[in-house]
């Protein structure tokens, strides 16, 4: 058993006044305050804090660290808040990288576009000669120029993809916006993929950024099997400074064939040389899209689109059966659900799995939990579902004012992000950042959770 004594600085526990020492044995706190220095006759290591404070670190309940790290190495629009600024950044990147045959940009602010939809000709005006595909912060859409659509063979005759949408003009011609996995998938095979070297460098950047904010554990909420290898190799190489639990994304059309691979991935992450830093105990589902793009699944039609209730990624029966199967495999369930119909479908799926598989300590998570019908709020506590919120979103920012409020209308908008209501009803709450969708700095989100500003 290894033991460490920290002393000589304020030990902040948030459970009383600061202490002056803390003893740790095999990674667990065993004594705080007066009894810490005498807990053992000798310690393997003594850390003199020299007046510096020691306090608990942060855990991020929903993020995408590997993707965030690689985004920082590409054309990254984070922090740009205007359409002109976004196009100018694209122009500069194009001039500085003449060797790139296809330009990919990440994390543009969807509120800079009317109804969150851009047009191909706006990108053509900046970069007409090479394909361009840009992803918004929420990553639930793709904005393409004309060259990219030609490369993917997309025109007015292209059929609507399953589990996605092509935004079209009145004459049926694509405008350059493609929604959800089905729409984005139209560019599979032609748009360049992030190679392993970029992933490795992205992991280094992600670990640096997480550690700089005191984050020591994160749920990576959408991981492929090859991306798990990046984390595992990073742990073996000593790159990992933050523990990661990888959530494998279950595909609505492929999940049955994915099942054995995910079980094997979980086993590989549990090997002795990586288990301390990497686990793979979770399955991620996308019940729906996002309200800003009109793809979040609603119980009643959108206020600005009375013909549409959004775009569910699963049927209710399909999600319930997939959740049951992965729950039976012992995985934790983590479901992206934004709209009130999406949240209800997620709760129904957890209820089905619980009924079919029997009681266990399963701790299912519904992530984002943006719009919850009042009738469904008590079900979180009753089913033991953890409501994961990204608290930074729970305020009147540009996306809320320009996109969400017009789509939901005032009555439904007032029901968003019921953090205190679910907690008061006995529900368990966790917070995340959804980085790189928004800031990974925990104090940014906590400030909004307290003030709603």
Image (tube, rainbow, N blue to C red):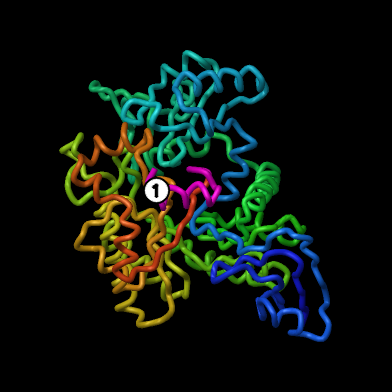
Q: Answer with the quarter of the image where residue 32 lies.
A: bottom right
Residue 433 is situated, as x and y percent measured from the top left of the image, at 49, 50
Q: Residue at x 40, y 55 (%)?
A: 389
Quadrant housing the C terminus: top left
Check disc 1 and report the residue beneath it.
Answer: 451
Residue 200 is situated, as x and y percent measured from the top left of the image, at 69, 47
Asked whether 195 or 256 is in front, the reply is 195
Asked whether 309 or 424 is in front, the reply is 424
In-image side of 260 versus 18 (left or right): left
153 is higher (above) or lower (below) than 314: above
Residue 351 is situated, as x and y percent measured from the top left of the image, at 29, 72
How many residues crowd around disc 1 within 10 Å: few (fewer than 14), some, or many (20 or more)? few
In-image side of 350 versus 42 (left or right): left
Q: Is residue 318 visible?
A: no
Quadrant housing the N terminus: bottom right
Q: Residue at x 46, y 69 (%)?
A: 332
326 is higher (above) or lower (below) than 86: below
Considering every residue shown, the one lying at the far top of the view is 125
In-image side of 91 versus 2 (left or right): left
Q: Residue at x 39, y 48 (%)?
A: 451
Q: Is residue 316 magenta?
A: no
Considering every residue shown, the one lying at the far front of the view is 17
Q: Answer with the quarter of the image where residue 307 lies.
A: top left
How many numbered discs? 1
Asked whether 41 or 309 is in front, the reply is 41
289 is higher (above) or lower (below) than 74: below
Q: Answer with the quarter of the image where residue 410 lies.
A: top left
Residue 187 is situated, as x and y percent measured from the top left of the image, at 47, 35
Residue range of the region highlighted in magenta in the rendering: 436-453
Q: Residue at x 29, y 58 (%)?
A: 343
Secondary structure found at label 1: helix
């Amino acid at each position: 058993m290894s033991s460490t004594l920290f002393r000589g600085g304020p030990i902040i526990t948030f459970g009383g006044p600061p202490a002056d020492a803390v003893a740790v044995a095999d990674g667990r706190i065993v004594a705080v305050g007066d009894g810490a220095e005498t807990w053992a006759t000798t310690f393997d290591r003594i850390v003199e804090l020299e007046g510096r404070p020691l306090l608990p670190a942060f855990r991020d309940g929903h993020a995408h660290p590997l993707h965030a790290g690689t985004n920082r190495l590409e054309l990254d629009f984070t922090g740009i808040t205007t359409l002109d600024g976004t196009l100018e950044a694209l122009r500069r990147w194009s001039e500085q990288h003449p060797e790139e045959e296809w330009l990919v940009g990440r994390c543009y602010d969807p509120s800079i576009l009317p109804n969150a939809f851009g047009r191909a000709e706006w990108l053509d005006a900046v970069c007409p000669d090479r394909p361009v595909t840009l992803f918004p912060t929420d990553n639930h859409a793709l904005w393409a120029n004309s060259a990219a659509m030609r490369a993917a063979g997309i025109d007015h005759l292209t059929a609507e993809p399953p589990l996605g949408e092509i935004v079209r003009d009145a004459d049926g011609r694509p405008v350059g916006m493609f929604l959800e996995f089905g729409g984005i998938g139209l560019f599979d095979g032609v748009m360049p993929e992030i190679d392993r070297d970029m992933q490795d460098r992205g992991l280094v950047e992600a670990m640096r950024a997480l550690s700089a904010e005191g984050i020591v554990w994160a749920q990576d909420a959408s991981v492929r099997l090859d991306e798990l290898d990046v984390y595992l190799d990073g742990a073996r190489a000593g790159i990992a400074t933050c523990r990661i639990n990888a959530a494998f994304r279950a595909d609505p059309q492929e999940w049955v064939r994915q099942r054995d691979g995910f079980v094997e991935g979980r086993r590989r992450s549990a090997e002795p040389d990586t288990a301390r830093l990497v686990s793979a105990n979770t399955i991620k589902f996308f019940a729906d899209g996002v309200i800003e793009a009109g793809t979040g699944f609603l119980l009643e039609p959108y206020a600005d689109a009375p013909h549409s209730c959004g775009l569910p990624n699963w049927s209710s029966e399909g999600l319930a059966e997939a959740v049951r199967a992965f729950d039976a495999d012992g995985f934790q369930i983590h479901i992206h659900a934004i709209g009130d119909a999406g949240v209800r479908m997620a709760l129904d799926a957890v209820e089905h799995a619980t009924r079919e598989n029997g009681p266990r300590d399963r701790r299912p998570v519904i992530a984002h939990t943006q719009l919850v019908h009042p009738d469904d709020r008590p079900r979180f506590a009753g089913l033991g579902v953890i409501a994961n919120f990204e608290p930074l979103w729970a305020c009147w920012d540009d996306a809320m004012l320009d996109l969400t409020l017009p789509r939901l209308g005032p009555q439904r908008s007032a029901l968003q992000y019921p953090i205190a209501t679910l907690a008061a009803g006995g529900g368990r709450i966790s917070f995340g950042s959804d980085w790189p969708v928004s800031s990974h700095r925990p104090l940014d989100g906590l400030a909004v959770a307290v003030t709603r500003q």
